[in-house]
Image: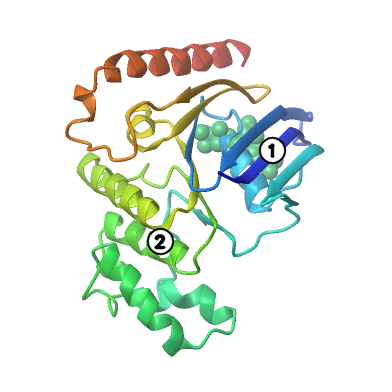
Amino acid sequence: MAEQIALKDVSLQFTAKPHAFTVLEDISLSLQKGEFVVLLGPSGCGKSTILNLVAGFLQPDTGRVLCGGKIIQKPGPARGMIFQQPNLFPWLSVLDNVTFGPRLGRHRKEDVNAEAMDWLARVGLQGFEHHAPWQLSGGMKQRVALARAWLPGPEVLLLDEPFGALDAQTRLMMQELLRSAWLETDTTLLFVTHDVEEALFLADRILVMSAKPGKIVEEIVSPFGRERDIETLAEHPQYSEIKHHVLHRVRQEAKRHLNTL
Ligand SMILES: Nc1ncnc2c1ncn2[C@@H]1O[C@H](COP(=O)(O)OP(=O)(O)OP(=O)(O)O)[C@@H](O)[C@H]1O
């Protein structure tokens, strides 16, 4: 497998008042092409900051952030991002929301519409292409956001707690949908969550972070295989042990962080 994303000895300070602080210290990580990596850690440890560096919204103070071996200097279509809020344009239809980026990039509407319709069908929104965002549920809006992110064929998708605002059932459906789209497209995914069960279901690899300064303190390689099923995952002989270990580790870091506040 080829290396798709790499952070090499990355440190970053924010100069927020009343004083500057180090948000990330000496972070090194690497994602292979087609890998699904989940970042877990206490609130404020710098998970979104890592996504923002990979997206090209931020530059590190020291170290390098690379995509396909090249230094990331600015945002680009090779790296898509999905946030907790779907951020759809309320005045555009579902289809026009999904095709907005490629049309800005001067692709002809007719050329992108067929592919967009295909993505809408994959995320279960066939027949909703002419609906307005206000006519959709929260889960449906987030499915539009998934289709929109996947349409330009990004090499990397960065997902910042994308299902955090959804109810438990919708969340499970979205997790399954994300995994099947990922398996079909072989995109490289970097996903941020607070939810240990979500991380266990989704990830090839989980990276646990500490806070103040943000560091990666543990890596857990999933033993569950790629063809996993949400209904039977908990029956895997190692599931309880790994879940317990990850929960304990995340709680340990969260408590340590609280004590430093
Ligand atoms: N642009 C900024 N300027 C100053 N401080 C910032 C900026 N962005 C984030 N921070 C601070 O940096 C720290 C890390 O923020 P970040 O959003 O990366 O954490 P996180 O782990 O994603 O948190 P959460 O899980 O709560 O979303 C926080 O203390 C946050 O307040």
Closest to the observer: 38 or 193?
A: 38
Amino acid type, residue under disc 2 in the picture: Ala
CB at disc 2 and ligand 1 closer than 8 Å: no
Residue 181 visible at all: yes
Q: Residue at x 40, y 61 (%)?
A: 145
Disc 1 from disc 2: Cα separation? 27 Å
Q: Position of residue 215 (x, y in %)?
A: 64, 24
Q: Position of residue 71 (x, y in %)?
A: 76, 51
**Residue 186 falls left or right of residue 22:** left
- Badges 1 and 2: C-beta atoms under 8 Å apart? no
Closest to the observer: 139 or 6?
A: 6
Disc sitting over residue 7 in the figure? 1
The quadrant of the picture showing ligand 1 is top right
Secondary structure under badge 2?
helix
Closest to the observer: 225 or 261?
A: 225
Secondary structure under badge 1?
strand
Total numbered badges shown on the rendered structure = 2
Q: Is residue 220 above or below residue 230?
A: above
CB at disc 1 and ligand 1 closer than 8 Å: no
Residue 93 visible at all: no
Q: Residue at x 75, y 36 (%)?
A: 16
Residue located farthest toward the right when viewing the structure as drawn: 62
Point out the frontmost of discs 1 and 2: 1
Q: Is residue 245 above or below residue 44?
A: above
Disc sitting over residue 145 in the figure? 2
Q: Position of residue 247 (x, y in %)?
A: 39, 17
Q: Residue at x 35, y 45 (%)?
A: 165
